[in-house]
Amino acid sequence: MSIWGTGATVDADSDIISKRGIGRRPITLEDEETALSNSSAISYLDRDRRLHELETRAFDCLVVGGGITGAGIAREAARRGLSVALVEADDFASGTSGRSSKLIHGGLRYLAQGDVKLVRDTARERKEVRRETPHLAEPVWMILPSSSKISHLKFSAAVTAYEKLGEVAPTERHRSWGRDELEEHEPALDRDRYAYACVYREYTTDDARLVFANLRAAVQAGAQVANRLRVESFPVEEGRICGAVAVCAWTGQKVQIRARAVVNAAGPWVTRVRDFEAPDSSRGLHLSKGIHVVLPKSILPVRNTVVLGTSDRRSTFVVPRGEVVYVGTTDTSWPGGPDYWPSITRADIDYLMAPLSDYFHTERISAEDCLATWSGLRPLLAQGNKNPTEISRRDEIWEGETGLISIAGGKLTGYRKMARSVLALLFEKLGRRPVEPAEDARLPGGDFDGDIDRMAADLSQRMEIESMVANRLVRLYGSESEEVLSGGAGPLAPGAPVLEGEVDWAIVYEEAACLEDFIYRRSRAAYYEPQWCDAILEAAARRMGGLLGWSSERERAEVESVRSRRHADLDFGVEDRRDS
Ligand code: FAD
């Protein structure tokens, strides 16, 4: 049965959504009711009602920021019985949480820096993230190549310590590969230079989809959430913060939200949001830029995630995903303010490309080979004059003078733990006895036995779709893939792996409202299927437009906007790296 029921028709005469505005809903009542009967839906079609609820209810807690930190806090608060609202200024996962290396990892390199607690906590969290959301924490073997026996032994010793801290099960512990195993499992690696490898377990994810899974779990547990609502001030009563005033990016409407406690989880913007409470607060962030490049697998045919050493004694990752491979990341100070699209320079690209020809049997790979890029800012806790690579990735909670709770720093991998720390403080502030969640729930899409390859094979057979398409779908939507497909199993362009039903799903379950939302943060086509982007843009815009009542001018404008965004992603400018 389709998520749309029987007849998803567009009412051409309805008061159509104006350029980025909300009008009457162009979809039939039956469709809407079918979609909204799933209580985890964050439907754009239902936005008026949600904004109304945000304005009329009084919440225990308001979370500012729809990245992984905010989404995790909202979910943990809602499942502990608090009434929760979350607002996001731009799109969900449009900040750092859509721009990471997409690894659920403990960060082996932080061990070398002596950050044992951080490594232990995040290494243990990996298992929990996998348990709750197996489609978004897929175990992979990471290959750490060495050119000499001595460095191989050093790496193996470090990995052994890492595994002890992370309480890794014996079957999951590292192994050593020599030339023969490398030839069999990673033939692209230059074995004449790198004849040894320590191979250990980490997990790959999709960061933005992890955010959506947490937000929907929060909604399922009773939270109210909305994107494109920017907090601009905090009202205060009797010296205490009592909510926020937020502005809708589509209409300019001001929404007043009442809450007994407010949590600032604004990532790189955390100090900006704190300034609404008390300007120029002393504690600060050190923003550090990290970029990734996406290359065709045909020129870098790796089979596993490979860790490469760089000239400045850092490491970068080469991660295969579908038909592409992404390489990242850099770590350079970003002296400007927070930014959704930090610029990428030619030097950033060269830095990532340099080790590739050293490690792999490959022709020289250059900037011209890039299919896509992304760039994000780490919200690191400032530590004197340390350079970004030396700064700890730990998190910290700050309390403001009217009671604003801000959480800063941290890593994607540690989001559950960060949420639990905030919750402990929240219960104290609310004068309530801490509650543990009643059930040990999975996140939406995570309801299966963890065998993702088998799930893909079953889906491919049952729904008669190519295995490549099924493999892609289950890694984005997990056990909900079949429901996504029920909205439309046809490709958005002949042969494309991105399907029509994904557009519908994005609007009805994940509050997508423009083409960029779909291409960049829901389907992730901008990063994992860049070779298909040009072909699918028009069909995706037509389908979105059909459901949201866009005019043909609006459809064209949406396509143009994403095209120029993609063009900008591949325009590397000429200036040098800002820092080293
Ligand atoms: P964000 O995701 O930036 O979310 C903050 C949100 O607040 C934004 O969406 C923003 O729009 C919103 N906001 C701002 N102002 C307002 C306002 N006034 N009103 C409402 N909303 C507002 N960690 C890992 O564990 N594994 C990795 O592989 C990894 N790789 C990384 C690679 C790079 C290049 C980078 C930059 C980071 C990486 N990290 C990794 C770290 C991880 O990505 C971040 O720690 C995490 O995503 C931060 O999430 P956040 O929710 O705190 O911030």
Image (tube, grey):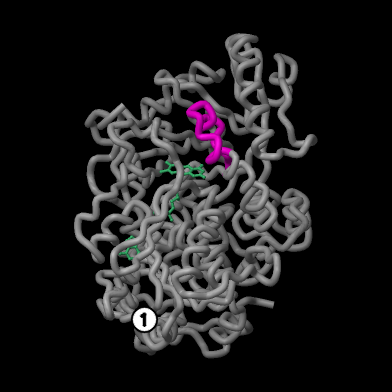
Name the image quarter holding residue 104: top right
* Looking at the image, residue 465 lies above or below residue 382: below
How many numbered dots are placed on residues in this image?
A: 1
Q: Nearer the viewer, residue 448 or 24?
A: 448
Q: Nearer the viewer, residue 441 or 330?
A: 441
Residue 494 seen anywhere in this rendered image of the structure: no
The answer to whether 301 appears left or right of 84 in the picture is right
Label 1 sits on residue: 258
Mark 1, Cα crowd under 10 Å, few <14 / some 14-19 / many 20+, is many
Q: Secondary structure at mark 1?
A: strand
The answer to whether 195 appears left or right of 510 in the picture is right
Q: From the image, which quarter does the C terminus lie in?
A: top left
Task: Determine the residue positioned at 60% across, 33% down.
Answer: 305
- Mark 1 belongs to which amino acid? Arg
Residue 199's x, y, as percent?
Answer: 67, 27
The residue lying furthest to the left in this view is: 279
Residue 42's x, y, as percent?
Answer: 50, 74
Residue 109 falls inside the magenta stretch: yes
Residue 77 seen anywhere in this rendered image of the structure: yes
Name the image quarter holding residue 381: top left
* Looking at the image, residue 556 lies above or below residue 57: above
Span of residues in magenta: 104-119
Residue 28's x, y, as percent?
Answer: 51, 88
Q: Nearer the viewer, residue 484 or 306?
A: 306
The answer to whether 42 appears left or right of 18 in the picture is right
Name the image quarter holding residue 124: top right
Residue 519's x, y, as percent?
Answer: 45, 57
Task: Determine the residue positioned at 67% across, 31% down.
Answer: 200
Residue 106 falls inside the magenta stretch: yes
Q: Nearer the viewer, residue 202 or 550?
A: 202
